[in-house]
Every structure is written in structure tokens, then in C-alpha cells.
């Protein structure tokens, strides 16, 4: 088995491997400056340009504080950039929309709704009939492994289960793009691994576009077609790396794959070289 | 506390209080301080007298109206203030001004303008209840997790839908804490308003009896009003617990009579 060297310097916008995907998200010279109490304003994002192809799984990887969340919020339409423009399917993003579904590290479930109620919320909002919405919610809950927990309130669930509900809730209203902000960051290692596997299984079924923020190199390499490496102060894209690993990916196989190991080592080396060594391995 | 003892504790406390009262009153032998037994014996005549019942029911009606109007006004206002800086900036100075004024102290002016009838008394109750409810609704709305609102926005909820369907339920535990304080304040302002504008009501019976030196009736009325307060609070607490059964235990009331 030949070891393919990775090709750093492959820039954003270059079509992904064999799949010449149409762009679904275009981020064009986006900068974000936050006013601070001190004299100098804080530049959270500086001149970010990135294109995400339809159906791609793209990770944004970088040390904490480099603006990963801010970038995701801009794509979500929750925050508007100081300058530059973000587009979804060619249309400028001016606010949140059902075409982009966020999944937050904090879960952000509706605590007054049962698990089923949370997942049904979006479909009902879109005018789906209650019986149909319930059937859909039950299917999705089965898919994330939560059959039997429909009547539970969020407070009765563990962190991993809450995140499964949050994922099902977002999938339920059928967004074209999933925006995941360190969704597994608050979970223990074992739970995180299981959720990564399950997320890939779900993604394999319909290949929704995923923009996935993480600060774990392994997580980014394991999940992604493309890893966007960011550095901080100011937040910039320093490298975009295509991850040429076979799919569907199985963790047991990947761990034995020298290419997988090589990607991880190379990415860590690049972060070390830049002095951004706060990145946990 | 011991599981067997817990439900008995309030009963024991009441018995202890009555016993201390009885002994103190027997010891002091003062006309204006009837014994506990005499006061308790004065309760049934009040509760069987048609006139008194009409008065007490009138009090309760004013209290219910004042309390309901206050909630209908204060919860939306508090929620809006919690989510909109401009609204908060506009109403805050006004509320800061009203906050330290004892609402009953406004009674003479209100009576001057609106007379001694139901309107004045209901208005005072309304004012008394409003402030804690506005304050707690404001705090509750301010504390709503932004990501929850973003999740709603991504599902297509408009700003007003988010206020009604996310901010309101998310802030409900805090709002109900304010309502519980408001309920007790409603009882207090109800009695005080009737003390000032003597015309009808439970407070009126009490102060009339005081004027006529019927001290057992005075104490009986204090017991009746107190019992009303405890029952209303306990009933409200049952409703509150049911409404927020989904919430994390940190929202539980530190103080509870049940
Ligand atoms: N609303 C805000 N106001 C001021 N500064 C902010 C705000 N949001 C983020 N920042 C700052 O911008 C930088 C990037 O934040 P963030 O996007 O959360 O980074 P990351 O998700 O990579 O950890 C951080 O230094 C953070 O303190
Ligand atoms: Mg972040």
C-alpha cells in the first residue's frame, strides 16, 4: 500500500479530488473586528476566503480563539461580518435560514420540550402535520440511537444523548448544510468516538454538506474530505488540506492506515512550526 | 430532616405557636390580647356571617383581578425589557422611581383621583404585584441562552415567535418565582388598601372590629387572612412545580411551605 504524501498549499476553491463539486458555501474576503474596551479593536477574522463544495465534509481546525466559531456563526447568519461577504448557493447570507442547520457545543435544546418535542419542533414550524412530524422525529431518533427516550426531558439525558437529540433536531427540518461547532467538545473521549462514528454513518447516507469546527486534529482528519487550518491573532486560514482517505471510513481500519497517521503528524507539525502549540494533540 | 417527621413539621410548628400564644396571653391578662382559644372560637361566626363572607369574597375578587392584570402587563413588559436594550433603557428609570415607594403610600392620591371603590384598591394591588414580576421576567429573559434563540431562528421562527415560544418558556421558572412573590404582595396590598380606604373587604372587618374593641375578632381575622395567604401560596407552588417540572433543580425555590 503506497503512502500518498499530502500536498500542503492546496488552496481553497480547488475542486475536491475526483468529485468536482459545485460550490454551496462561498466565503469571500470576510473579516470580523470586535470592539473592545481597550484602545485596540480585536481582529477575530482577517480576510477569510473559502469555498465549500456541495456534499463535502469540511473541518475548520485551529487553536481556541482563532475565530472558528465566529466564522461558523457568519455562515449561519447569526453574526454579520465587518467586511466581506458569505454566500449560500450564490445568494448573500443576511440571516439564519432553514437551509443551514447549526449544532452547538452547548446543545441548546429546548428544556421545556421532551426529546420528541425538540425533534418535532422544526418540522411543525414548517407546517408539517403533527402525525407526520412525529413519525419523522421517531425515525431520526432511531437513527441517532435514542429509541425509547422520546418522552424524556433534556435534563434527564447525558451530554452525549443531548448532542444526539440536537443533531436529530437539526436534521429534522432538512437543512442543506450542517454547521457543527465543536459538537463533541464537551463529551468524554469514549462518547466522542462513538458519536464521530455515528455521525459518519449518518453522513454516508445522504452526504449533506457539513462544516465542522474542531480543535482536535484526529477528529478533523477522521471525519473530513478537507481540513481548513487556521491560525490566530488575527484569525487567518493558513492551509487547506485535502484528506484523501477511503470512504466509508472505519475507525479500526483507519487507525492502521499509515496515510491517516501521516496526515495527523503532518498537521501537528505545521501547527508546531507556527508556534500555535496550544493545539491539543 | 427525618422522613416521618417532615410532613408533620408545619403542623407541629403551628401547635407550638398557638400554645405559646395561649400561655403568653394567660400570663399577661391584657384585654387587647385575647387567648388563642378565644380567637379561634371567633372564626366560625365570621365565616358563617353572610355580610363578612361578602366582604372577604370582595377582597379575594379584587386581589384576583389586580394580580391577573399585573401578570398580563408585567410579564410581556419584563420579557421585552430583557431582550431589547432600548425597551429596558426606556422603562428602567421609571421603575427605579416607583420601586422604593411603598405602594400603599400612593393610596391617598389614587383615592383622590379614582375614589374609594374597587378601582383604586385594584390599582394598588396591580402596582404592588407588577414590580417583582417585571423584575423576574426581565432577569429570566436576559438569561436565555443565545444559542437557543439561534436554533429557533434557524428553524424559521420570527423575532416575535422567538419571544413567545422560546423566551417565554425558557424564562418561565424565573417568571414564576416573581409571580410567587407577587402573590404574597397582592395579599399584603389588598389588606393595606382596605385599611386605608375603609369601605369593604377583609381589611375592613378587621379594622372595624379594632375600632369597636372586639379583639377576638381582630385576631380571628388575622388568622383568616394568614391562612388565606398560606393556602394561596401552597396552591400556587403546586401549579408552579407542575409548570416547570422540566427544569433543572437549580430553579427550585429556596423557600417552600409545602
Ligand atoms: N461577541 C464578541 N465580542 C468580542 N469579542 C469576541 C466576540 N466573539 C468572539 N470574540 C473574540 O474573537 C476571537 C475568536 O473567537 P471564537 O470565534 O469564539 O474563537 P474559537 O471558536 O476559534 O475559539 C476570540 O478572541 C474571542 O474572544
Ligand atoms: Mg469556539
Image (cartoon, helix red, strand yellow):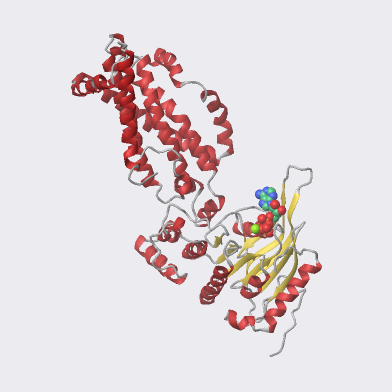
Q: Foreground residue, A37 or B231?
A: B231
Q: Is residue A8 left or right of residue B52?
A: right
Query: Which quadrant contains ligand 2?
Result: bottom right
Q: A11 above or below A3?
A: above
Q: Quadrant of the C terminus of chain B?
A: top left
Across and down, in percent, residue A131 comes to 34, 63
Image-based side of B194 in relation to B247, left or right: left
Q: Quadrant of residue B38?
A: top left
Counting from the top left corner in percent of width and height, residue B140 is at 50, 42
Position of residue A66 in the picture relative to residue B141 (left or right)? right
> Where residue A1 sits in the image (x, y, percent)?
68, 90
| Residue at 38 percent of width and 42 percent of height | B240
Question: In front here: A279 or A96?
Answer: A279
Q: Residue at x 48, y 35 (%)?
A: B77
Q: Quadrant of the N terminus of chain B?
A: top left
Residue in view at x 52 percent, y 23 percent: B100
Which residue is found at the position 70% from the left and 75% from the top?
A264
The correct choice, above or below, for B246 with respect to B205 in the image is below
Say whether residue B64 is visible. no
Query: A149 or B109, which is in the foreground?
Result: A149
Q: Is residue A239 visible?
A: yes
Would you place residue A103 above or below residue B2 in this image?
Answer: below
Residue B151 image point, x, y percent: 52, 55
In the image, residue A23 above or below residue B257: below
Amino acid at each position: 500500500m503506497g503512502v500518498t504524501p499530502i500536498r500542503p498549499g492546496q488552496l481553497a476553491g480547488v475542486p475536491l479530488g475526483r468529485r468536482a463539486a459545485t460550490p454551496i458555501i462561498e466565503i469571500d474576503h470576510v473579516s470580523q473586528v470586535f470592539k473592545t474596551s481597550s484602545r485596540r479593536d480585536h481582529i477575530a477574522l482577517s480576510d477569510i476566503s473559502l469555498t465549500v463544495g456541495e456534499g463535502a465534509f469540511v473541518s475548520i481546525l485551529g487553536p481556541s480563539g482563532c475565530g472558528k466559531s465566529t466564522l461558523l456563526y457568519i455562515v449561519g447568519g447569526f453574526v454579520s461580518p465587518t467586511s466581506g461577504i458569505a454566500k449560500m448557493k450564490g445568494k448573500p447570507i443576511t440571516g439564519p435560514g432553514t437551509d443551514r442547520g447549526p449544532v452547538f457545543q452547548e446543545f441548546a435544546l429546548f428544556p421545556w420540550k421532551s426529546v420528541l418535542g425538540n425533534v418535532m419542533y422544526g418540522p411543525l414550524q414548517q407546517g408539517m402535520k403533527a402525525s407526520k412530524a412525529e413519525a419523522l422525529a421517531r425515525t431520526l431518533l432511531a437513527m441517532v440511537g435514542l429509541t425509547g427516550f422520546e418522552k424524556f426531558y433534556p435534563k434527564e439525558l447525558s451530554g452525549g444523548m443531548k448532542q444526539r437529540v440536537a443533531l436529530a433536531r437539526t436534521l429534522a427540518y432538512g437543512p442543506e448544510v450542517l454547521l457543527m461547532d465543536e459538537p463533541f467538545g464537551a463529551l468524554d473521549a469514549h462518547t466522542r468516538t462513538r458519536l464521530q462514528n455515528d455521525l459518519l454513518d449518518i453522513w454516508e447516507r445522504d452526504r449533506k454538506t457539513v462544516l465542522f469546527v474542531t480543535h482536535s486534529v484526529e477528529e478533523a482528519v477522521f471525519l473530513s474530505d478537507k481540513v481548513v487550518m487556521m491560525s490566530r491573532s488575527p484569525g487567518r486560514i493558513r492551509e487547506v488540506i485535502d484528506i484523501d482517505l477511503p470512504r466509508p471510513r472505519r475507525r479500526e481500519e483507519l487507525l492502521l492506515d499509515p496515510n491517516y497517521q501521516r496526515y495527523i503528524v503532518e498537521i501537528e507539525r505545521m501547527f508546531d512550526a507556527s508556534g500555535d502549540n496550544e493545539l491539543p494533540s | 430532616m427525618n422522613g416521618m417527621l417532615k410532613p408533620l413539621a408545619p403542623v407541629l410548628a403551628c401547635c407550638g405557636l398557638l400554645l405559646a400564644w395561649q400561655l403568653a396571653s394567660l400570663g399577661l391578662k391584657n384585654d387587647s390580647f385575647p387567648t388563642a382559644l378565644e380567637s379561634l372560637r371567633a372564626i366560625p361566626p365570621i365565616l358563617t356571617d353572610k355580610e363578612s363572607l361578602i366582604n372577604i369574597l370582595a377582597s379575594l375578587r379584587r386581589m384576583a383581578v389586580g394580580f391577573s392584570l399585573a401578570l398580563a402587563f408585567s410579564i410581556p413588559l419584563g420579557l421585552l425589557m430583557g431582550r431589547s436594550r432600548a425597551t429596558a433603557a426606556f422603562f428602567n428609570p421609571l421603575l427605579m422611581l416607583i420601586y422604593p415607594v411603598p405602594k400603599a403610600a400612593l393610596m391617598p392620591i389614587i383615592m383622590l383621583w379614582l375614589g374609594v371603590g374597587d378601582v383604586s384598591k385594584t390599582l394598588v394591588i396591580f402596582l404592588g404585584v407588577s414590580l417583582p414580576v417585571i423584575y423576574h421576567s426581565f432577569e429570566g429573559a436576559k438569561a436565555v441562552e443565545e444559542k437557543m434563540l439561534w436554533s429557533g431562528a434557524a428553524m424559521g421562527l420570527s423575532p416575535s415567535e422567538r419571544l413567545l415560544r422560546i423566551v417565554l418558556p425558557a424564562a418561565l421558572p424565573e417568571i414564576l418565582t416573581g409571580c410567587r412573590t407577587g402573590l404574597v404582595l397582592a395579599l399584603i396590598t389588598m389588606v393595606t388598601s382596605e385599611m386605608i380606604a375603609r369601605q369593604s373587604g377583609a381589611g375592613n372587618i378587621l379594622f372595624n372590629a379594632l375600632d369597636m374593641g372586639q379583639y377576638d375578632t381582630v385576631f380571628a381575622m388575622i388568622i383568616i387572612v394568614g391562612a388565606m395567604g398560606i393556602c394561596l401560596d401552597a396552591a400556587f407552588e403546586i401549579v408552579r412545580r407542575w409548570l416547570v417540572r422540566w427544569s433543572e433543580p437549580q430553579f427550585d425555590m429556596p423557600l417552600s411551605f409545602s
